[in-house]
Amino acid sequence: KVILLHDNAPSRTAKLVKETIETFSWEILSHAAYSPDLAPPGYYLFASMGHALAEQRFASCENLRKWLGDWFASKEKQLSWRGIHKLSDRWEKNV
């Protein structure tokens, strides 16, 4: 069983996307009322990044790009996967 959580950006509401969702009989998980601090798609990833950025100051865009590249490279591949699995807990607390 697939439960799909996505935003309502135009590309996601296009006819082809809707047909694909219907073809595979995926269930759509509706979002809770919008709250920027609970926006689910990148919550776990960006919460982790936010903590790492808390004490950072960048003298240039190039320094920021390098920091971001190093930060992403240092993350284990399962980082986002764990976050996705935590979404159901966060969703249930807020709905």
Image (tube, rainbow, N blue to C red):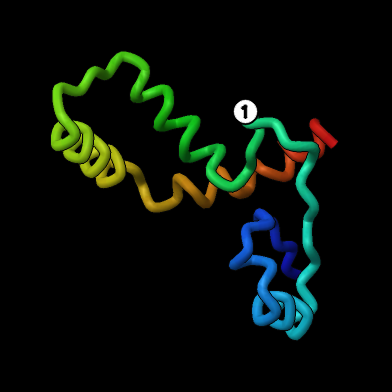
Residue identifier under label 1: 37
Give above or below for 10 relative to 75: below
Relative image position of residue 72 (x, y in whole percent): 30, 44
Residue at position x 15%, y 32% in the image: 63
What amino acid is found at the position of numbered circle 1 in the picture?
A: Asp
Residue at position x 72%, y 68% in the image: 2
For the C terminus, give its image quadrant: top right
Locate residue 70: give its quadrant. top left
Q: Is residue 78 left or right of residue 16?
A: left
Front residue (pair 35, 26): 35
Locate residue 7: give its quadrant. bottom right
Give above or below for 47 relative to 4: above
Front residue (pair 58, 24): 58
For the N terminus, give its image quadrant: bottom right
Relative image position of residue 12 (x, y in whole percent): 64, 66
Residue at position x 73%, y 82% in the image: 19
Locate residue 89: give its quadrant. top right
Relative image position of residue 91 (x, y in whole percent): 76, 40
Crowd tier of the residue under label 1, counting other residues whose Cα lies within 10 Å: few below 14, some 14–19, many 20 or above: few
Q: Residue furthest front?
A: 10
- How many marks on residues? 1
Residue at position x 73%, y 44% in the image: 88
Helix, strand or loop at label 1? It is helix
Q: Residue furthest right?
A: 95
